[in-house]
Amino acid sequence: EYFTILWPTVKAFSIESAGNVLDRDAELRIFTNLPDTPRDSPGAGAPRRARTRINIDFRKGRADIYAIQRFFADKVLGTDTVDPSASAVSMAGQVDSGSGNPFSWMGDDSRMVDAEAMDRQYKVNPPILQHCEKVEMAFKGRRDLVLMTSKRLLFVDIKGAFGLGKKVEFTSLPWTTVTAFGVKSAGSFMDKDSECLIWTDFDDIWYPPTEGEDSPPPPPIPRRSFIELDFQKDKVDLMAVHRYLSERCLRVEGGHKDADGYYTPNLRPYDMPVSPDIMAPTKPGALDAVLGWLGNDAHALNPAELNAQLHGDTKMLQDDERAVLAYKAGRDTLVFTNKRIFIIDVQGMSGKRIAYKSVPYSSVRSFAVESSGSWDTDSEVKIWGKFHWMDGPGNKIKQDLRKGKADIIAIQAYLAEQTIGSQDGKAALPAGATAAEAGKVSNLLSFLGDNAVSTNPSEIEKQFKTSPRILQSDEKVEQAYKCGRDLCVFTSKRIVLVDRQGMSGKRIEYRTVPLRYCHAFKFNTAGSLMSEPKCKIYVSGAADVQQDLSKSSSDVWSVQKILAEKILKK
């Protein structure tokens, strides 16, 4: 078998040095996003996707594992542009104060250590870092290290009892692989650790085997799909970590085409160091002041006032970042800035444990807003992201909003501007190309069969540009299909799915699927008797779209042409 892996599919990598006499093999592990059918049944004793991890063993003394690491770093992180420095020295003589707390030591909670010392060590002994790369923040647990550099997250895992073994694993996670991030403060006085949260764009979820036929399946493990780093709360400035991650993971000016040919905002270049002011200590009491200002009642927040709070002593937002829409629901806060979706999630009985989660708009793959109904008082926002774990296997974030306190159409419009605003809005079909109107009998059969009847695109476009205002000004409706009470609309930029729920039909969900993230599609033409044409659209990072089409009223090839024009590369 000759199996070829293209470099754009390599999302992360690790090397593991050879151990003692009984463990003489070194190992290279490649993390990929290769397509594979996900495993749905837990307890299988296998990963959800078989090709996420590819392991290659090397016999000790037969391969230079560090040379392999440098080669992968050049390919995945970018070429090392600086020659080795003769002035680099080892870490000899550096003193670490230690955890100072037996509970933190047993829990393997990390503390901040000297980043410059780590930079000097891992450019020489062993030579892991590129010479154009710089360690900007460093954390040490009981024996392991986490280094945040100008190019990657580097995990140093020392194997063996008490860390005395020779086997060490170095895992490199490029910043381009991080699709969301967050920090979580410590809770009550018994909770001694805060946390850093990292979400990645490859599916590394593992289903452990069941212990017996009658045993319940054990919960899945996210592995590198979702990473939690425990910190000693009194030895790590959590807001400084949050500010640093914002600098490394949020977009800056300009952009480029990614491996799929889509325009992607640029991240901070490795040769643009993060300012020391970002990592400066946070003023004591600054975070409590922000939380006190937010309060506990449900309401829409004034963006100008919120900007002043989030740009204050905590510096939660970047200097060139501003809050545009903000809502408070219960104890939680949802903020839409010009760079990310920012969620403040208050947890626990005391409310002292708080998660601050950031989802860059470049990680959003689909979104929906849902109005409140007759009996329920909350409207909702749903986000499908380029990650695979969110409180369990899945990639959906759901946030409730109090009825009457949030303009869900404004939220929808702003999300559309951030996710599809720069996409080409020209029509794929000639002007006036619509499907024929269906007759009364056909309408009845379509309704009973729960398939779709074509409607007039110009009428839908007029409706969706006025009440409610769903579409953008340069967006065209090309085909629309009514399915019972629901609606499926193909526009020049996206697929809009309108789902009316409940007996009254007042609870309505408007879901957007950008065409730029639709990577494949298929059609089934109508057969004999009662069969109807169908289409299925495969979406990267969100649920696939399936739609029945009425054979008597739909030009199925018009939909095929829309998708071909928008999805296939020229």
Image (cartoon, rainbow, N blue to C red):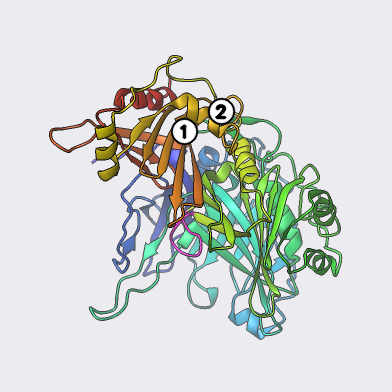
Q: Residues within 10 Å of mark 2 (few under 14, many from 20)?
A: some
Q: Give x and y (percent) for residue 250.
A: 67, 45
Q: Nearer the viewer, residue 5 or 419?
A: 419
| Residue at 40%, 67% in the rendered image | 220
Q: Amino acid at mark 1?
A: Leu
**Residue placed at 41% from the left, 43% from the top?**
486
Quarter of the picture holding the C terminus = top left
Write down the residue under mark 2: 423
Main secondary structure type of the part rendered in magenta: loop
Q: Is residue 430 left or right of residue 372?
A: left
Q: Is residue 448 magenta?
A: no
Q: Which residue is mark 1?
A: 515
Query: Mark 1: few, some, or many residues within 10 Å (few <14, many ≥20)?
Result: many
Alpha carbon of mark 2 to alpha carbon of mark 1: how far? Answer: 9 Å
The residue at the far left in this view is: 528
Q: Secondary structure at mark 2?
A: loop
Secondary element under disc 1, as helix, strand or loop, is helix
Q: How many numbered circles are shown?
A: 2
Question: Where is residue 367 shown, x and y percent of the image?
Answer: 53, 46
Can residue 126 be seen here? The reply is no
Q: Position of residue 404 (x, y in %)?
A: 66, 56
Task: For the residues labelled 2 and 1, say whether their Cβ atoms are less than 8 Å apart.
Answer: yes
Q: Which mark is residue 533?
A: none
Q: Which residues are magenta?
A: 388-395
Residue 173 shows in this picture: yes
Q: Upstream in the sequence, badge 2 or badge 1?
A: 2
Q: Is residue 163 above or below residue 520?
A: below
* Amino acid tagged 2: Gln
Residue 506 to residue 459: above or below: below
